[in-house]
Image (cartoon, rainbow, N blue to C red):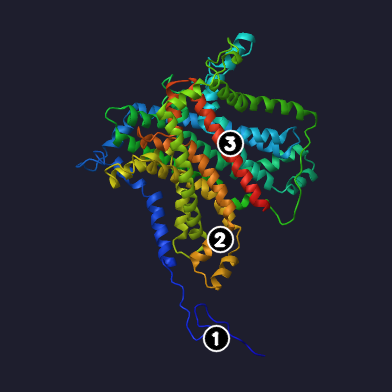
């Protein structure tokens, strides 16, 4: 038997008479890994350092002089308005979390494991608020369900019914927030319900339990990790929300932590920047503490393992005649929480006045859209948002892909910290993100060239959305076998060449989905822009937020319709593109 040795990559071919030069690596793999690691930590975690320093500094960081001090925290903690804001935020977050968990968990079980009619339709309507800008629903709620809203006024005039909750109170704001938060709980729990092995319920039924009792006593307790995850996420997001209290809490002087910081920065003369920085650090610590609490409460997740190696089909519990009344109740709730507010946005945008005393068809108009087109700042804000979402979404998608490949497909010694760094912005409230980049630009860019441009705003928006894009891209990356890029490397490809030509090419559909979600997120974002936007760089989300806080006119609703149309168009285009790629 004759054994023929294969030539090594770069070695001379037999009989060729010449030696082939090995391909040069322009950047060694290890150097490239370290460069990506450093840049990621500086961009994602680095901005927290200036905001922390600003909270302990006696003067703004962009001024000379100053010294370390605890005065900012002393002023914050001795201000009664601050503690009133903390109490309001905590109460609002608690109300929103409880109502969202009850509704979301109930909907997940009802629409997944029972035979209630129109399950798919109800699920589609329920998750619609997740795909739309939150401000759109707030505007719709004001137009239809406020004390002087169209539907609430019509009910009072023509029936004996009335809307029992005042939107300009804490319970009213919590009800509006539930519209957006409950779908999040539903999505968390629905995935878990679908993954639970029905054989566990069969064991309870074989012991004599009724099917409905088996569902409640076996399946529902297994939802504990999903409920805790979603509940703490809802609480954290509700605690730092800005748009809702800024729009609905102003009339009754209800101040939240977010509006307290907003007022002391925007409306104070001069701005209390040290005080606001101290409040932002407090807010960041609270949100980080909630994530630590979540890990302790969930405990050992192996206790909730329910997926076995034996395949079983999903079983649906027959509710009998009760399913039709339940469907009617669910349809009514969705109509009040989602359908009617969305209809209110459209009606307000296309009418000159929305009142039950005048038929809407007699006051149809496009003047609200003409006002946006005729206002240079308003129209420019739409263009700027599209640029930030388009260019920023592409660059952020590329960054997420490269960082994910280094974090999960390399032997880089610090790859674990890269994984944590990408998820870190999820803990940072939007206001904190914007303020962190403001202070970073104030130190590194004294001229304001970056801070006063769309690049600065886009960077803040992109960092805030990193965790969202990473959550979409990483599962697809994990599904690609490592033997494929190893095969490319044994053929002479460098690590970077194998990653780009094999791994990233195979994960192109996931990159497209990542870009779609980043585009929608960055298009509708507003909170980080509070500290970065100038008169020359307006963005649509913040423009709409400021208009909604000072007016309930049709221009705000017209902005909402524009946001909805762009968002739904991008989501539809992404779905079509991904469907074509899947069948290609």
Residue 568's label in the rendered image is 3
Q: Which one is earlier in the sequence, the residue at label 3 or at label 1? A: 1
Near mark 3 (Cα within 10 A), the count class, few <14, some 14-19 or many ≥20, is some
- How many angstroms separate mark 2 from mark 3 (CA)? 30 Å
Is disc 3 placed on a helix, strand or loop? helix
* Residue located at (30% from left, 44% from top): 53
- How many angstroms separate mark 1 from mark 2 (CA)? 33 Å
Looking at this view, is 555 or 46 the one in front? 555
Looking at this view, is 357 or 320 the one in front? 357
Looking at this view, is 205 or 509 the one in front? 509
Residue 14's label in the rendered image is 1
Residue 190, by quadrant, is top right
In this rendering, is residue 366 above or below 48? Answer: above
In this rendering, is residue 151 above or below 83? Answer: above
In this rendering, is residue 536 above or below 44? Answer: above
Looking at this view, is 528 or 308 the one in front? 528
**Residue 251 image point, x, y percent:** 43, 19
**Residue 169 image point, x, y percent:** 49, 21
Task: Look at mark 2 in the image and give the residue it sits on.
Answer: 503
In this rendering, is residue 60 above or below 325? Answer: below
**Residue 552 image point, x, y percent:** 48, 20
């Amino acid at each position: 038997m004759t054994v023929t040795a294969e030539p090594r990559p770069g070695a001379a071919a037999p009989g060729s008479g010449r030696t082939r030069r090995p391909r040069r690596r322009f950047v060694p793999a290890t150097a490239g890994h370290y460069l990506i690691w450093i840049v990621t930590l500086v961009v994602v975690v680095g901005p927290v350092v200036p905001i922390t320093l600003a909270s302990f500094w006696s003067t703004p960081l962009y001024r000379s002089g100053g010294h370390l001090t605890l005065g900012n925290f002393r002023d914050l903690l001795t201000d009664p308005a601050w503690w009133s804001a903390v109490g309001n935020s905590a109460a609002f977050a608690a109300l929103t979390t409880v109502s969202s968990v009850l509704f979301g968990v109930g909907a997940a079980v009802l629409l997944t494991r029972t035979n209630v009619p129109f399950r798919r339709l109800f699920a589609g309507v329920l998750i619609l608020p997740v795909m739309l800008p939150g401000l759109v629903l707030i505007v719709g709620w004001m137009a239809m369900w406020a004390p002087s809203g169209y539907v609430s006024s019509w009910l009072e005039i023509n029936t004996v019914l009335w809307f029992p909750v005042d939107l300009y109170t804490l319970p009213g704001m919590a009800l509006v927030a539930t519209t957006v938060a409950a779908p999040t709980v539903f999505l968390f729990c629905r995935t878990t319900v679908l993954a639970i092995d029905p054989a566990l319920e069969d064991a309870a039924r074989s012991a004599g339990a009724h099917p409905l009792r088996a569902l409640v006593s076996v399946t529902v307790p297994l939802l504990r990790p999903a409920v805790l995850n979603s509940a703490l996420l809802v609480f954290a997001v509700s605690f730092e929300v800005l748009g809702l209290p800024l729009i609905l809490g102003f009339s009754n002087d209800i101040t939240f932590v977010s509006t307290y910081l907003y007022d002391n920065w925007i409306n104070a003369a001069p701005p209390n920047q040290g005080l606001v920085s101290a409040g932002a650090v407090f807010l960041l610590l609270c949100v980080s503490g909630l994530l630590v609490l979540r890990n302790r409460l969930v405990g050992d997740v192996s206790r909730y393992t329910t997926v076995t190696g034996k395949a079983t089909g999903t079983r649906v519990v027959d509710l009998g005649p009760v399913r039709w009344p339940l469907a009617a109740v669910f349809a009514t709730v969705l109509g009040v929480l989602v359908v009617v507010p969305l209809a209110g946005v459209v009606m307000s945008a296309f009418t000159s006045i929305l009142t039950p005393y005048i038929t809407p068809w007699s006051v149809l108009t496009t003047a609200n859209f003409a006002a946006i087109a005729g206002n240079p700042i308003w129209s420019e804000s739409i263009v700027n948002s599209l640029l930030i979402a388009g260019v920023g979404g592409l660059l952020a998608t590329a960054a997420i892909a490269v960082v994910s490949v280094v974090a999960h497909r390399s032997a880089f010694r610090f790859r674990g910290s890269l994984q944590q760094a990408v998820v870190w912005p999820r803990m940072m409230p939007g206001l904190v993100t914007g303020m962190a980049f403001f202070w970073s630009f104030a130190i590194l860019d004294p001229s304001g060239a970056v801070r006063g441009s769309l690049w600065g705003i886009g960077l803040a928006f992109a960092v805030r959305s990193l965790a969202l894009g990473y959550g979409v891209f990483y599962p697809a990356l994990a599904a690609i076998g490592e033997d494929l890029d190893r095969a490319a490397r044994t053929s002479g490809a460098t690590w970077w060449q194998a990653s780009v030509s094999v791994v990233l090419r195979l994960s192109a559909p996931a990159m497209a989905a990542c870009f779609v979600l980043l585009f929608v997120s960055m298009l509708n974002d507003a909170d980080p822009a509070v500290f970065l936007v100038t008169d020359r760089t307006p963005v649509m989300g913040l423009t709409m937020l400021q208009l909604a806080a000072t007016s309930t006119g049709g221009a705000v609703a017209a902005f909402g319709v524009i946001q909805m149309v762009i968002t739904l168009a991008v989501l539809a285009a992404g779905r079509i593109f991904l469907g074509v790629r899947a069948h290609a």
